[in-house]
Amino acid sequence: MSNGRGSRILRKRKVAAAIGYKEGDFAPLLLASGRDREAEQIIAVAQGAGVEVVEDEALAVLLDTSAKPGDFIPPWCWEAAAKILAFVIETDKQS
């Protein structure tokens, strides 16, 4: 997008990823990922289902670019995903 004076205005893209973990699995699964409208749909579905939405843009971008829905998340994302899942589990216990 240009403002007519030779400069550009960049719009930040929205990105979202949904992860899940089943007891016994060695790593969380990527349930869904997407950008822009897909990201908005993922967030809306999660909120509609009462799923906790945690913002971590860096992890969402990594997951969106390095795994496909249905895949286990890559090892380099495990620590960040574990922190998010721990937060969500603790939040669920308190409610």
Image (spheres, grey):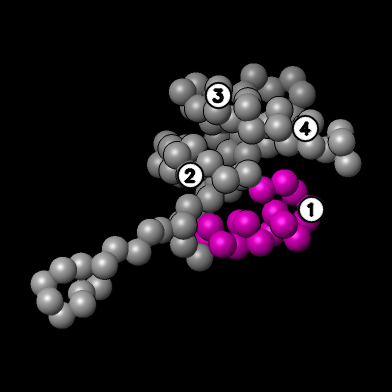
Residue count near mark 1 (Cα–Cα under 10 Å), binned few <14, some 14–19, many ≥20:
few
| Alpha carbons under labels 4 and 1: distance apart | 13 Å
Instruction: Pick whichever of labels 1 and 3 is earlier in the sequence.
Output: 1
Q: Is residue 68 above or below residue 13?
A: above
Question: Which mark is drawn over residue 89?
Answer: 4
Provide the residue designation for mark 3. 78
Question: Which mark is drawn over residue 57?
Answer: 2
Residue count near mark 3 (Cα–Cα under 10 Å), binned few <14, some 14–19, many ≥20:
some
Provide the residue designation for mark 1. 50
Task: Inspect the image, locate mark 3, and give the three-letter code of the amino acid beneath it.
Answer: Trp
Q: Nearer the viewer, mark 3 or mark 4?
A: 4
Q: Is residue 2 above or below residue 58?
A: below
Instruction: Pick whichever of labels 2 and 4 is earlier in the sequence.
Output: 2
Instruction: Pick whichever of labels 4 and 1 is earlier in the sequence.
Output: 1
| Alpha carbons under labels 3 and 2: distance apart | 15 Å
Q: Is residue 54 above or below residue 89?
A: below
The residue that appears at 46% across and 57% down in the rendered structure is 14
Is residue 40 shown in magenta? Answer: yes
Label 4: element kind: helix
Marks 1 & 3, CB-CB < 8 Å contact = no
